[in-house]
Structure formats: C-alpha cells, structure tokens
Amino acid sequence: MAVKIRLMRMGKTKQPTYRVVASDSRSPRNGRFIELLGTYEPRKEPSGININAEKTTKWLQHGAQPTERVQKILEGAGILTGEAAAKTLAAKKATKRPAKQKTMKDAPAAETPTAEAPAEEAATEEAAAE
C-alpha cells in the first residue's frame, strides 16, 4: 500500500482550510485517510500551519511520500529538511523536469506602430527646427 501525505480540503466555498493527512494513494482527495497529521490555513496572515512533527516524521520514515504542496509546507514548518527533502518524489520530479524554453508563442508581440507615432515624430521635427 502506497501512502501519501496530502491535503484534504475542508471549509466553506471560497474559504478553504486543509487537513494534512496520511492516506492510501488510491483513495480520493476527500475520502478515507489513515491518520490526521495537522491542519493548514492559507487564508490567515501569515498562513496557519499546525502539524504534529512526531506523527509526520514517523510516516516519512515508513516511506510515505508527501505531495509537492505538502512538501513545501513541511519545509516551511521545519519538519522536512536537507537529505529527507531530497529523497521525496516531489524533489526527484523537480530535478527531472527540463528548464522551460521560450518559444515564439511565449515571447511578447513586437510593438506595432500606432497613429500617435507620426504625430510624435512631427513634434520632434518642429522642436528641432526652432
């Protein structure tokens, strides 16, 4: 059984709060979970992070893989550091991703001359003549 440490959405519409849970990777996002590890409240300033470090490190030592967002939360809380962070699947995926290259579609469109441009040129010519 592959165990993931992930976020389970709670709260009202447009006011999310999340539970950090250890769950089977095959169960749905808001479905069954094995153990509640903590909460994450992104709408607070600064974000509210309440995670039980003992339970979380126990699951990480037993092979549970955090999702990318949970990994960032755990690193911010100081639970996941150094070598442990490099061993997660999210970190391995990030190293495999090639750098995104700009294409012609991504580049901003070249500026096209507008009707104001000839008027500006005429104004500069008049100022130079005086």
Image: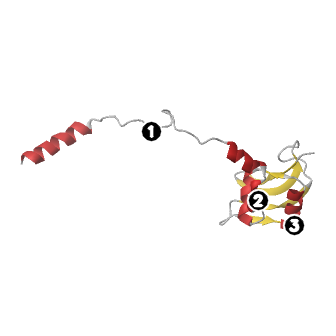
Q: Secondary structure at mark 3?
A: helix
Circles 1, 2 touching at the beta carbon (< 8 Å): no
Closer to us: 15 or 125: 125
**Outermost residue to the top:** 104
Residue 66 at x, y = what percent?
80, 52
Q: Residues within 10 Å of mark 2 (few under 14, many from 20)?
A: few
Q: Is residue 3 above or below residue 105?
A: below
Please state which amino acid type lies under the numbered disc 2. Glu
The image's colouring method is: secondary structure
Mark earlier in primary sequence (1, 2) = 2
Residue 129 lies, in percent from the top left, at 7, 45
Tag on residue 54? 3
Q: Quadrant of the N terminus?
A: top right
Q: Which residue is identified by label 2?
A: 83
Q: Is residue 118 above or below residue 29?
A: above
Of callouts 1 and 3, the N-terminal one: 3
Residue 108 bears which disc, if any? 1
- Quick one: which residue is furthest to the front in this view? 83
- Distance from label 1 to label 2 (Cα)? 40 Å
Crowd band around label 1 with a 10 angstrom C-alpha radius: few (<14), some (14–19), many (20+):
few
Structural crowding at the residue carrying mark 3, measured as other residues with C-alpha within 10 Å and reported as few (<14), some (14–19) or many (≥20): few
